[in-house]
Structure formats: C-alpha cells, structure tokens
Image: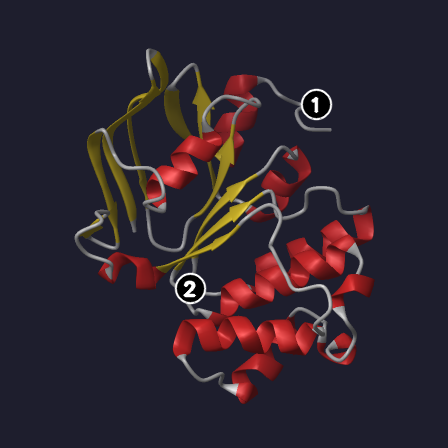
Amino acid sequence: MIKVDQLHQSYGKKVVLDSISIHIAKNEFCALVGRNGAGKSTFIHSLLGLMPVKQGKIEINGMTVTKKSDAWKRTIAYLPEKFMLYPMLTGLENMTFFAEAVSGKADLERVEQILQSVRLWDDRNEPVKGYSKGMLQRLGLAITLYQDASILILDEPTSGIDPMGRKEILEILKSLQDKTILLSSHHLDEIRQVCTHVAFLQDGKMEKYTVGEFLQTQKLGGYGA
C-alpha cells in the first residue's frame, strides 16, 4: 500500500532522510516514531506529495507519487495535528462544507453515519468554537474518514487531549476496518493499543518492527509516558 524506496531528503547540506526504504502493507496499522526533529514531518509531507522527492521513489497503492498525476491522491487521506475548522460554523456545517469540497455534493446519509461513529451527532448543531479539543479532533477525523480513502495518515491525533478524549479517539481508530494507517505518535500506550508495527526514525534512517520487537529492541519501557 505504501512503498518507499531509497528516499533521500535534505534541507541544504542537512540530510533529514537518508536513503529510507520501507513497505507498509495493506491493513497494517503502523506507528511513526522518532524524537522531535527526527524528520517525521518531512517523511509525511513526502508521502503526501507536499515535498518533492529529491531522490528515491514513493508508491501509494502501486501508483508513483508525482505532480504529473493525481490518481494516487484519491486513495490517501491526511489528518494534520491541528485541523483548520471554521469556528463560527456548527459541526454539521463544517462536515458538510468539507464533504462538498471532496465530492461536489455531500452525501447527508453518510455524513450522519460518520458523525454518529465519532459520537458527534448529538452536538452537530453546536458552533465548533464551543467544542473541546477532543471534539475538534474527532470532527477532523470524521472529515478525514468521509473521503473513504484506503490509506490514512494521522499526525498526532491525540495531541493535547485529556485522557478521556484520547480514549475516545483510540476506540474510534480500533473500530476502523480495511484501512492502512500510518500514525505519528509520541505515546507508547497508544502504540501498544492500536498499532501492529512501528516505523522508527532516527539519525536519518528508518527501521520497521512489530510492536513487540520495537519494545524489546529499543528498551523503551517508559517511552512517551
């Protein structure tokens, strides 16, 4: 589903990603882990085509990531750490606006289904300026899920959320079916709960592990606590 071959990215003379190769298979739930400044954002932006590939190759569902074609974009959806919503609009109005941006006409039955799944249907008519951080993240996730992409890239989806809000987000993620997910996270408990694999980025290099291998090899019992 996601195949990266010898990806090399740099800013001037500073090498950020040093000939990275990794394969994330269908229906894997892979955590993207690394210290601040390790290059996680550069890696994500490369996958999304937001940063041109200087050296190497990226394939999404067998299609090469390139500006010359956008067919691959229809198979991938991205939830940034902070989703930019319209604070004066209600949750439903925000959801409908972004749904129309994706498909031209919002499928109101699907909008309701997704808002129900993220537990925001009862709050749909409230302006989002009054939403909690957890509710805002769940609405951003709902908008991302509306695209029905087979690949989801989630950048710190529980950042700054209280424990109950984090639990709600993780329960939603665990309920997703037939999705390939790359989740950037600093929280070891999240990785243990929802992920099958870990892509560990360090010193420009990336290694992939099962979650168990990662915990054993890196000896990070207190990581992200």
- In the rendered image, the residue lying farthest to the top is 13
- Mark 2, other Cα within 10 Å: few <14 / some 14–19 / many ≥20: few
- The percent coordinates of residue 150 (x first, y second) are 38, 62
Sequence order check, earlier mark of 2 and 1: 2
Instruction: Identify the element where label 1 is drawn.
Output: loop
Disc 2 on helix, strand or loop? Answer: loop
**CA distance separating discs 2 and 1:** 31 Å
The three-letter amino acid code for the residue at tag 1 is Gly
Q: What coloring was used for the rendering?
A: secondary structure
* Three-letter amino acid code of the residue under disc 2: Asp
Mark 1, residue position: 222
Which residue matches tag 2? 178
Instruction: Write the residue at 67% across / 56% down.
Output: 137
Image position of 208 with respect to 120: above or below: above
Which of the 4 quarters of the picture holds residue 49? top left
Closer to the camera in the image, 142 or 89 = 89
Query: Where residue 16 sits in the image (x, y, percent)?
Result: 38, 20
Which image quadrant for residue 140?
A: bottom right
Q: Is residue 224 left or right of residue 208?
A: right
